[in-house]
């Protein structure tokens, strides 16, 4: 029977795995943005202006940056989509784990763990209802219903 400590450890492990996946996705986004910026800088080389409030980043640079960003994201879309799906699965698993009934930690020390919903009883009740609703029929073997010749 799982204890409260095991449940907390499982949830912590799930959260850690999800954080690692999110971190990996953020690294990919950062790599794409940095690469797009380097592509703009190398494509549009110009004299650098040093001064207060003087930026060398122009509106055409921004347009080129956004185009490069879209191209690079498209090239790595399979990896990004796979990580996004993995994040969604991990979030759903964490939510399902949180909603799952867990034994009362105080009852575990006394030896009588209680669950908020007893799944076994409910399963047996559903099985009984289903068997009553659709009784099995036996096929008649042989001739017609009216007797014989």
Image (cartoon, helix red, strand yellow):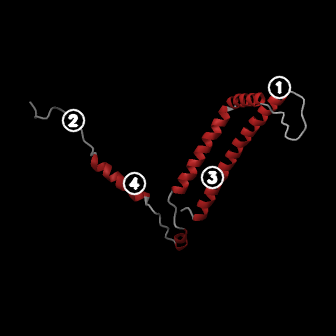
Question: In the rendered image, which residue does mark 2 sit on?
Answer: 141
- From what the image shows, is residue 149 above or below residue 95? above
Q: Residues within 10 Å of mark 3 (few under 14, many from 20)?
A: some
Which is more foreground, mark 1 or mark 2?
1
The 10 Å Cα crowd at callout 1, few under 14, some 14 to 19, many 20 or more, is few
Residue with the mark numbered 3: 14
**Disc on res. 123:** 4
Q: Earlier in the sequence, mark 2 or mark 3?
A: 3
Mark 4 or mark 3: name the one nearer the start of the chain. 3
> Which residue lies at the image location 21% right of the left edge and 37% below the top edge?
140
Q: CA distance from mark 2 to mark 3?
A: 58 Å
Nearer to me, 137 or 70: 70
Q: CA distance from mark 2 to mark 4?
A: 35 Å
Q: Quadrant location of residue 51?
A: top right
From mark 4 to mark 1, how far is it between C-alphas?
66 Å
Mark 1 and 2 residues: CB-CB less than 8 Å, in contact? no
Q: CA distance from mark 1 to mark 2?
A: 86 Å
Which numbered dot is residue 43?
A: 1
Q: Looking at the figure, which quarter contains the C terminus?
A: top left
Residue at disc 4, secondary structure: helix
Residue 108's disc is: none
Residue 147: x %, y % from top left: 10, 35
| Residue 46 percent location from the top left of the image | 88, 28
């Amino acid at each position: 029977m799982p204890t409260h400590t095991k449940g907390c450890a499982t949830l912590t492990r799930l959260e850690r795995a999800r954080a690692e996946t999110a971190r990996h996705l953020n690294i990919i986004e950062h790599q794409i943005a940095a690469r797009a910026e380097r592509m703009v800088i190398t494509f549009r080389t110009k004299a650098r202006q040093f001064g207060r409030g003087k930026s060398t980043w122009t509106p055409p640079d921004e347009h080129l940056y956004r185009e490069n960003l879209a191209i690079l994201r498209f090239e790595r879309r399979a990896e990004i989509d796979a990580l996004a799906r993995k994040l969604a699965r991990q979030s759903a698993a964490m939510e399902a784990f949180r909603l799952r009934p867990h034994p009362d930690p105080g009852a575990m020390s006394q030896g009588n763990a209680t669950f908020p919903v007893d799944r076994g009883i409910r399963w047996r009740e559903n099985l009984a209802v289903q068997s009553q609703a659709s009784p099995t029929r036996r096929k008649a073997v042989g001739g017609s219903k009216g007797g014989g010749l």
